[in-house]
Amino acid sequence: MALVLGSAIFVVDTFTPLEGAVAVLYVLVVLIAARSGLTDDLFIASACVVMLTVVAYLWSHGPAPTSSSLMRAGVSLAAIGIASVLAYRNVMATQSLLKANDALRKSEQRYRRMFATSRIGVLEEDWSPLRRMLDGFDFRTTAELARHIGEHPEMIAEAKRFPQIVAANPEAHQMLGKAPDTSSLGSIDRLLAPTDRTFEGALLAFASGAPSFEGETEILRSDGSTIPVLFSLTFPNGSDEDAVLAFMIDISERKHAQEAMLAAQAELAHAARVATLGELTASITHEVNQPLTAIVTSGNAALRWLNRDEPDLPEAIASVTHAVSEGKRASAIVHRIRTFLTKTPIEHAPLDLREVLNDAARLVERDLSQHNVVLRLAIARDLPAVSGDAVELQQVVVNLLLNAAQAMSETRGRRVTTLTASRLADGVQVVIADSGPGISGDLEDLFRPFFTTKANGMGMGLAICRSIVTSHGGRLWASSEKGEGAKFHFVLPKAN
């Protein structure tokens, strides 16, 4: 079309007597060529019509042109030049738009592909109704909103009904147990389990303009069951639209694994306590026999005081009182042993660590004497109270004292174990030292599960001890100089 039109304009401009600026019509040729969207076509067409204009001018007017013809030629060339420049800018703008549209289309395809094939549940939600609800309250700060929620907790249940689920990927549908039908999803109120406590934080983050919010909650499936999920919400950044993306990961297997691990740890700790108690049977028997013997002795004494010709009631009462006291002591010993063996949940409470350490020392006294070990106690009187479980802390001390005794089993000469407890600025430090040969190698290996230096050891005692101390907010470590024995230190924070 451009070629035919250009040829016709050239013929009219060159071989007809028309005196007007016929060459201006070449602008049409330029515009037609520009419709191809190719800059090469535009350049070729522009160069050709300029050349045709000059040839027609020279053909018609020769070497001596008039001023009017020269002006008409100039106007024609100017029009062609302006049209070419404008057409070039239009072509470049069109190409830019086409590239941008192609990039947008590819980005949309990429997003849809990720949305559809992702192994993470993705929900697209519309929070604009919630935005309008918050605007109706006219809260000036997030703190005002938080205070209002505290005073009116029913607002959370109401607010959950506003955000609407717009779309869900196949993984999200599978997690929810729903068919791929967006209309069946509804508001997030139908998605969150009644036990959810994260929506308030998400609401405050959304109102404050935060870019995202993360948490862990439970969601409802179509059959009424719940599944635990980790989720992340991405909020819009300053746009008018309130489109929110929610990413969810099913952590059911992880939860089951955690529960199994906790159960296994509880079983392992229980087995360790039973094994430790088995080693202490002789000491326990000895300890229980002491108050029982005292009870029998006091009872016989009371009978003798009563069987006299003149019963000595004050002495009899004193003997019975002593028997009752020893009976209570025996009961406490039995109760401590029963607690030591139970699998009931551990409860932390303020403890007198002096009493805990003294009880543990008495518990192993007979076993240490059988190893010819002398136990020295250096327990400060001003120890602050610590928070924890007495039985577990006794287990730590008993295990460390027995380890010290066994470490000196081949030591010649005097065998001494020292139990020291001193006050720290923020807690208590306990050190159990022996006069054995010391420990060689990496001391941290001692606390690895199943690592043992004993021929018949299980390798779990020190690992359990460190776990117990760590659960009490403290830390346990070892130090040793060759030939100077070993020391086990543990630090516990003082009770609040």
Image: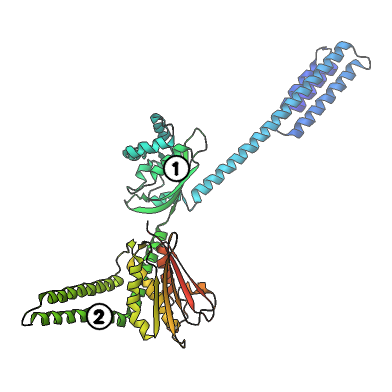
The answer to whether one can see residue 249 in this image is: yes
Q: Quadrant of residue 386?
A: bottom left
Q: Quadrant of the C terminus?
A: bottom left
The residue that disc 2 covers is 290
In the image, 209 versus 117, the foreground residue is 209
User: What's the residue at 64%, 34% (across, down)?
Assistant: 97
Tell me: residue 137, above or below residue 424.
above
Q: Are marks 1 and 2 in contact (CB under 8 Å)?
A: no
Q: Quadrant of residue 458?
A: bottom left
Q: Quadrant of the N terminus?
A: top right
Instruction: Check disc 1 and report its element: helix, strand or loop.
Output: strand
Q: How far across and down, in percent of the image, does residue 267 sit?
A: 35, 70
Q: Which mark is residue 46?
A: none
The answer to whether one can see residue 274 in this image is: no
In the displayed structure image, the side of residue 370 where residue 289 appears, left or right: left
Instruction: Check disc 2 and report its element: helix, strand or loop.
Output: helix
In the image, 260 versus 372, the foreground residue is 372
In the image, 122 versus 218, the foreground residue is 218
- Between circles 1 and 2, the one closer to the viewer is 2
Inspect the image, locate mark 1, and give the three-letter code of the amino acid beneath it: Ala
Inspect the image, locate mark 2, and give the three-letter code of the amino acid beneath it: Gln
The residue that disc 1 covers is 167
Tell me: residue 318, above or below residue 415.
above
Q: How is the image coloured?
A: rainbow
Q: How far across and down, in percent of the image, does residue 188 sit?
A: 38, 42
Q: How far across and down, in percent of the image, does residue 314 sit?
A: 12, 74
Q: Earlier in the sequence, mark 1 or mark 2?
A: 1
Dot 2: few (<14), some (14–19), or many (≥20) neighbours within 10 Å?
Answer: some
Dot 1: few (<14), some (14–19), or many (≥20) neighbours within 10 Å?
Answer: many
Q: Alpha carbon of mark 1 to alpha carbon of mark 2: how far?
A: 75 Å
As drawn, which residue projects farthest toward the left?
Answer: 309
